[in-house]
Image (cartoon, rainbow, N blue to C red):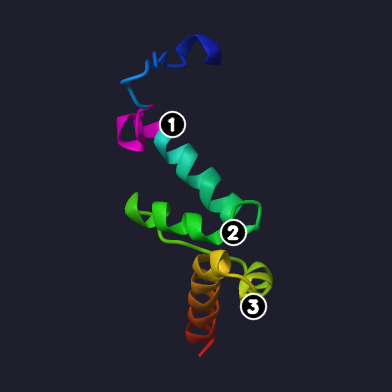
Amino acid sequence: SFLSRRPQWKVGPKQRLPNIEQLDPITRSNLLVSARHQIYTGKVYPFANYELMRAGTSPLLAPSVARQYIRITSPWELQNAAWAYLALLRGINQSE
């Protein structure tokens, strides 16, 4: 079954959880697809796109989600707004 194939990691006080490169290719791919979809639909903050880029996946953000993050009302929203502007600019450039 799926659960029996799941890798077992022991995390002690001096150990860290494995990073995505340590996952098998199928799990890694599924994780990236899922994360990308969650960000695209607005279920995960847009700034998480940075990690997708580091993993070699191009970031996406739905225009409707991007419009929700464009306005900056506090300093912590700056990262999300940057990704929102990027998504909207990409959408404008692709429609030309």
* Residue 27, disc: 1
Q: Residue at x 36, y 18 (%)?
A: 13
User: Which mark is nearer the camera, 1 or 2?
Assistant: 2
* Residue 40, disc: 2
Secondary structure category for the residue under label 1? helix
Secondary structure category for the residue under label 3? loop
Compared across the picture, whether 21 is left or right of 8 comes to left
Q: Residue at x 50, y 90 (%)?
A: 96
Tag 2: Cα neighbours inside 10 Å, few (<14), some, or many (≥20)?
many
Vertically, is 17 above or below 53? above
Q: Amino acid at mark 3?
A: Arg
User: Which mark is nearer the camera, 3 or 1?
Assistant: 3
Please give the range of residues in magenta. 17-27
Tag 3: Cα neighbours inside 10 Å, few (<14), some, or many (≥20)?
some
Vertically, is 32 above or below 11? below
Q: Amino acid at mark 2?
A: Tyr
Q: CA distance from mark 1 to mark 2?
A: 20 Å
> Residue beneath label 3, please?
71
Return the x and y of residue 76 as percentages of the image width and height.
55, 64
